[in-house]
Image (cartoon, rainbow, N blue to C red):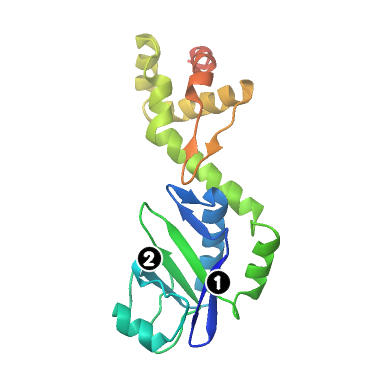
Amino acid sequence: MEEFTLDGITFVNPDACTFGDYGGAGSVGRANIDIILERIESEKMECKLISYGQLPQGDTTLEKEKSAHNWEGLLGTGGYTLWEDNDILPDAFLVSCGYGSETLYLREDKFEDEISALADYPCLDDEKVSEVEIQWEEEAFDSWAKDDLIRDLPDDLLGKLTRLKDAGAQVIWECYRDAMDKCNEYPTPEYSSSHIPTDRIEDTFTALLTVRL
């Protein structure tokens, strides 16, 4: 757990509130950050989006940090409630780093419950983690796994899928899910995506698709 102090206010980065393509807490980190950002937005709290180079260090003052980093007005978008006043400390800092990574620093006096909960257990909501992982599976399937599964299909099957048009995508998804169940395989969450073991289900997928079509 890392922290810094601005004008006597401590900001804490819980270990499981970091997410990125090559590090962080994976789907748990993504879920934790999303949950806290949702609270910030719903309660009209303020979160300042900054880069890693603007991250305050140690014990300092707001005025010193503003001078060092030229903080001016609103920074960033993304639907977050942003810091609207340069003279008032925000409730949180969302730090944007390289390779799509994000790190959340929380005011210790405003997020005592979340900080305490994450010290005992790294996940604020297991159901939210499941939602993130389902989304990642669907994105991985659409971006590459589907192509892997249908690339070597016989021409007659490909022709039938083409004639189904939009309905063919649903058939492919259903046969994929059935093949995963029958082969007792599962997508594996990685840092910011999901790995689908297409090589271990492709024969079963093809057999199921043949019967379906």
Q: CA distance from mark 1 to mark 2?
A: 15 Å
Nearer the observer, 118 or 134: 118
| Residue that numbered label 2 is attached to | 52
- Crowdedness near tag 2: few (<14), some (14–19) or many (≥20) residues, C-alpha within 10 Å: some
- Name the mark on residue 3: none
Q: Residue at x 35, y 10 (%)?
A: 155
Name the residue type under label 1. Answer: Val
Name the residue type under label 2. Answer: Tyr
Q: Residue at x 49, y 38 (%)?
A: 194
Q: Residue at x 44, y 88 (%)?
A: 88
Nearer the observer, 180 or 73: 73
Would residue 71 be visible to someone looking at this image? no
Mark 1, secondary structure of its residue = strand
**Which quadrant of the figure contains the N terminus?**
bottom right
Q: Quadrant of residue 116?
A: bottom right
| Relative height, residue 138 to residue 121 (above, below) | above
Mark 2, secondary structure of its residue = helix
Across and down, in percent, residue 156 comes to: 37, 10
In the rendered image, the residue lying farthest to the right is 120
Across and down, in percent, residue 167 comes to: 43, 29
Would residue 102 be visible to someone looking at this image? yes
Q: Residue at x 55, y 36 (%)?
A: 188
Question: Which comes sooner in the sequence, label 1 or label 2?
Answer: 1
| Residue that numbered label 1 is attached to | 12
> Is 187 on the left or on the right of 148, as rendered?
right
| Relative height, residue 118 to residue 81 (above, below) | above
Across and down, in percent, residue 95 comes to: 42, 66
- Crowdedness near tag 1: few (<14), some (14–19) or many (≥20) residues, C-alpha within 10 Å: many
